[in-house]
């Protein structure tokens, strides 16, 4: 909504009112909203979202968690690949006293002898078949990777929605600030007229004082609204993960798409909503867990191969030097015949978990559909209110111009003018609130249907 300041003629003012006019002039025009653009950066919604996605901590964390899940999705982690281990050792022994007696009656005594031994080996271990568990594990890791990606997208969507809502909240607070600025201009004109009427004897001091009281009240409301506007800007800076005192200027219009269709949104929501996507993936994980449990009913076939080299030297003993090079190959088969019915118990629990995951999905689907319906209703209602209040603002603005003219002529009282003025501010407020509500609903619909972030 573009700011439209009331057009007011400004006759000269007396010395009696000089101080109060100077004070209000400094209040309003030392930092007018429209002049901020000359001193601070312009920040569009697209730029705010870009900064937020680049800096937001929760998005970075969710992206890292998605990368962890993707790294875990490998053939080696699933058990498809063999393991190859290398070992090496060396040992030196010092014999303080050695006495050896042989079968032929000879004896050998050797004090201070030494013995050295070295060994090295390589071992290959490979599970060839584990009841198809490795295939199930690979599917589980793929599903977990998909869930990590979906959670990352949910984090992005959530923060984009927050930034979008915070941005448009600033627009609303800014427009309310301008409406109150218009109200102060009206009150200033009313004060000048009341003063002029008092000076020429056609008005009362009471009317003049009443006008000044209302002017001060409007100025106080302006200051409070300026605080709300400033705090809204700080909140957006927080969401952008930058200094909360960073100054910027934003657009002064809330653009609303009035053409969203419920049936199209519902179809996209059931297909593209990322929360539902996570629930579907969790159901798939539950089914894969049942497969993993049932793999324990199948045998396990393993292949092992290795080679070892050893060398031994001794000053005391029958052999002075010994050296061996060996290799071995082993194919093993194992099958659990009885495990105390534990596999059957785990299988039953896994089936119950599948049912629970299906129920959770249905519950989440119901919640999402209900949220979509309620949000769309708010969207439709807000659009209707925006149209009504836009027309009402125009009428209220016309009423202010008419009332000011009548007040100058003395055909209406200051109370009547104040009522018209309050109606104008109220209509401006309702209009901006309706615009923000419509935009919040639109953003919610786009988030639910998976269209907020492409």
Image: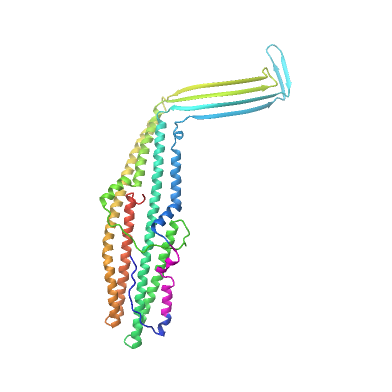
Whether residue 27 is in magenta: the answer is: yes
Residue stretch in magenta: 20-41
Give above or below for 367 relative to 124. below
Closer to us: 117 or 333: 117
Q: Is residue 330 found left or right of 323 in the rendered image?
A: left
Q: Residue at x 45, y 38 (%)?
A: 72
Q: Residue at x 53, y 29 (%)?
A: 85
Q: Residue at x 28, y 66 (%)?
A: 390
Q: Main secondary structure of the magenta part?
A: helix
**Quarter of the image holding residue 436?**
bottom left
Q: Position of residue 127 (x, y in %)?
A: 45, 27
Q: Is residue 111 found left or right of 240 in the rendered image?
A: right
Closer to us: 2 or 246: 2
Q: Position of residue 161 (x, y in %)?
A: 37, 54
Closer to us: 37 or 286: 37
Viewer can see residue 309: yes
Whether residue 388 is in magenta: the answer is: no
Viewer can see residue 363: no
Q: Position of residue 399 (x, y in %)?
A: 27, 74
């Amino acid at each position: 909504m573009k700011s439209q300041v009331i057009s007011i003629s400004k006759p000269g003012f007396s010395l009696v009112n000089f101080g109060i006019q100077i004070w209000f002039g400094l209040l309003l025009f030392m930092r007018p909203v429209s002049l901020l653009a000359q001193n601070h950066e312009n920040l569009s919604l697209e730029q705010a979202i870009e900064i937020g996605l680049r800096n937001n901590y929760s998005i970075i964390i969710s992206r890292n968690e998605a990368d962890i899940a993707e790294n875990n999705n490998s053939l080696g982690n699933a058990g498809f690949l063999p393991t190859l281990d290398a070992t090496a050792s060396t040992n030196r022994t010092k014999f303080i006293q050695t006495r050896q007696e042989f079968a032929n009656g000879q004896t050998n005594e050797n004090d201070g002898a030494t013995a050295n031994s070295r060994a090295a080996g390589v071992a290959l271990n490979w599970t060839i078949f584990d009841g198809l568990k490795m295939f199930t594990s690979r599917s589980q890791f793929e599903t977990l990777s998909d869930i990590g990606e979906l959670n990352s997208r949910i984090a992005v969507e959530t923060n984009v929605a927050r930034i979008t809502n915070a941005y448009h909240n600033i627009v609303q607070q800014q427009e309310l600030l301008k409406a109150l600025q218009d109200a102060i201009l009206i009150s200033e004109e009313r004060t000048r007229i009341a003063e002029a009427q008092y000076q020429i004897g056609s008005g009362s001091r009471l009317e003049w004082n009443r006008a000044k009281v209302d002017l001060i009240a409007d100025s106080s409301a302006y200051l409070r609204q300026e605080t709300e506007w400033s705090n809204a800007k700080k909140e957006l800076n927080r969401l952008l993960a930058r200094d909360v005192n960073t100054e910027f200027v934003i657009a002064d219009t809330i653009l609303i798409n009035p053409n969203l269709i419920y049936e199209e949104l519902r179809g996209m929501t059931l297909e593209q909503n990322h929360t539902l996507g996570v629930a579907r993936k969790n159901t798939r994980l539950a089914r894969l867990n049942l497969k993993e449990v049932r793999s324990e009913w199948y045998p396990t076939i393993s292949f092992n191969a290795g080679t070892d080299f050893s060398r031994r030297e001794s000053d005391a003993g029958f052999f002075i030097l010994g050296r061996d090079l060996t290799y071995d190959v082993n194919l093993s088969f194992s099958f659990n015949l009885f495990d105390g019915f534990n596999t059957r118990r785990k299988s039953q629990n896994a089936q119950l978990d599948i049912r629970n995951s299906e129920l959770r999905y249905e519950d989440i689907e119901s919640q999402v559909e209900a949220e979509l319906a309620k949000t769309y209703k708010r969207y439709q209602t807000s659009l209707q209110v925006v149209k009504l209040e836009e027309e009402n603002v125009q009428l209220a603005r016309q009423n202010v111009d008419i009332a000011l003219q009548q007040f100058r002529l003395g055909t209406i009282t200051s109370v009547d003018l104040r009522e018209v003025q309050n109606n104008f501010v109220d209509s401006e407020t309702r209009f901006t609130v309706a615009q923000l509500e419509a935009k919040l609903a639109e953003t919610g619909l786009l988030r639910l249907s998976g269209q907020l972030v492409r």
